[in-house]
Amino acid sequence: MADGPTRRASCPSRWLSLVCKIPISLLGLSETNTIGYYALGTLFLHQGDLPKAIPVLKRGLALCQGADIVTWFPTVAAALGYAYTLSGCIPEALPLLQQAVAQNPSKGISAGHARRVAYLSEAYLLAGRSDEAVDLATSALTFARWCSKCGDAPHVHLHKALF
């Protein structure tokens, strides 16, 4: 039993290395798999483990796009875009974040929109586009207040404070 906790602790790393090698066609193109990759990828993202987060989120985005799961696209694309931003890969981040923000919140995809806009704002700031970054940060804060999404508002305030 002494190796039980060690085995459990290494499980996510082993799972990640194995699951990222499985052809997407064998996984099935389901919303559940997309959500699973998003959840694991954002876990790694929040832990600051960007080398693990990026391939998992890329895989989730591929599943999402392959199955045309439009309701999850902005969420997964924004997480991947933000991981690229934090990695300093701004050219890879910007198109993903721009597409994620372009999803119209009036089509039922408003949850997390303010956060997605804040992520894009941060990427613009790091790309040297400070005027656009400030405009987007202001827009994100306004949207968060309008939607009363108290979960997004503190995150957006943090991004706004950068300016």
Image (cartoon, rainbow, N blue to C red):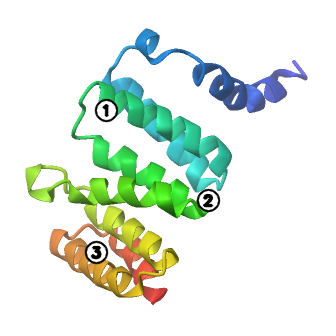
Q: Amino acid at mark 2?
A: Ser
Q: Up-down: is 3 above or below 132?
A: above
Question: At which x and y percent is residue 35?
Answer: 39, 34
Q: Amino acid at mark 1?
A: Gln
Mark with earlier residue (1, 2): 1
Residue drawn 14% across and 56% down?
Answer: 104
Residue behind mark 3: 140
Is residue 10 found left or right of 20 in the rendered image? Answer: right
Residue behind mark 1: 65
Residue drawn 35% across and 65% down?
Answer: 115
Mark with earlier residue (3, 2): 2
Location of the N terminus by quadrant is: top right
**Crowd band around label 3 with a 10 angstrom C-alpha radius: few (<14), some (14–19), many (20+):** many
Label ID, residue 87: 2
Residue drawn 38% across and 27% down?
Answer: 63
Question: At which x and y percent is residue 17?
Answer: 68, 25
